[in-house]
Amino acid sequence: MPTGALEGLRVLDLTSYVAGPYGCALLGDMGADVIKVEAPNGDMMRHYPSTLPGESRAFLGVNRNKRSIVINLKAPSGRDVLYRLARSADVFVHNFRPSVPESLGVGYQDILGVRGDIIYCALTGYGDGGPLRDHPGFDQLVQSFTGIADFQGAPSGAPQVVLGSIVDYFASTLLAFGVASAVVHRLKTGEGQFVDVSLLRAAIAMQASRFIWAENEPRDVSRDLSAGRLTGIHPTKEGHIYIQAHTPPFWNALCGFLGLPHLAENPRYDDMKKRKEYADEILPAMHEALKTRSAAEWEEMMLGKVPCLAVRSIGDMFDHPQVVAQSIVTEEEHPSVGRYRTMTKAVQMGAFKGRESTKRAPLLGENTDAILLEADFSAADIEKLRSEGTVA
């Protein structure tokens, strides 16, 4: 059976770090043949601090379903090798700063000259124009620049970034969405496409519900969308639990479970705005009641009746019954790391069951020879390129 909707699509992935690699991994999830083109020292994430032996946890996490080839684009024949691969590629992705591709000979016009219907995706920090176009672009920088850190730190009064590379991961989904849309466009018209994705655009898109400024409003108008302090993480006898009881049925059910029916009956608290306003009156009673049981016990009691879940660590997800039921976890074997558990495809499509699991992230240059042989390089050609330092 076909392995995915994008089976037969070949992607040249020249990206590093998180956003670009994971965007291409998502394309690989859908069956695309993703060739990771790395410089001789490899993707920077390979060298990121990690407790794993011989490999970075971050690199493994964002580079599944790929093959790796090492090409030195600064070597005299490196560019020619890449062009030869590009002739049979459908998609070309990089995350260089805007001034870099042309200097390496991999700008849009360069690759378009090799394959006229190429889908060329440039992932940048801030876009291809403007005063910040060539400024380094990283997740936490962009969070700080776009108001995410300011908003996150508002309760304490000090800006604070959201951990977990959230802008990178959202940008990766926009990359995969943009490329997939361009594939549909090419199927309809036969034309390639330039796909422009940036961390800046991703960070603002993530704040679409706050990024509204009506006429006559001050610039610093409140954009707080929170439902108040009742919604959030609360301490229990053991552990913490997140509770979100906005609607009347959920609020009434919560008060019943906590043994606080008088709160549900009090007209002073009968809608979400009032409960937000009078949180100081409600929270003490609520917290006192929550101290009588553990977070796990409250969750078991209220499951399906009140939106709540006990706070857990990411480690707990590997064997939680819900995660297991969804077949999200798979096992891989790695030459230096050994056997490890990780996630499968981020999106499941019922029509494509051919690739039930994923492939581990490749070693640096693990597939160089195989990829070059597919591009009609002979064994002698490959040996010569390797001796010249062009490939590895």
Image (cartoon, rainbow, N blue to C red):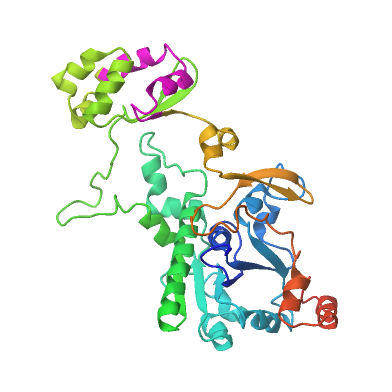
Q: In the displayed structure, does residue 58 sit left or right of residue 388?
A: left
Single out the residue that lies furthest toward the front. 1
Say whether residue 188 is magenta: no
Residue 49: image location, x then y, percent: 68, 47
The residue shown at (67%, 51%) is: 48
Quarter of the figure with residue 257:
top left
Left or right, 178 with reference to 390: left
In this view, the residue in front, 26 or 78, is: 26
Q: Is residue 126 visible?
A: no
Q: Is residue 303 magenta?
A: yes
Q: Which stretch did the figure color magenta?
A: 282-308
Which image quarter: residue 309?
top left
Task: For residue 142, say whether it is visible.
Answer: yes
Q: Quadrant of residue 386?
A: bottom right
Q: Is residue 295 above or below residue 276?
A: above
Quarter holding the C terminus? bottom right
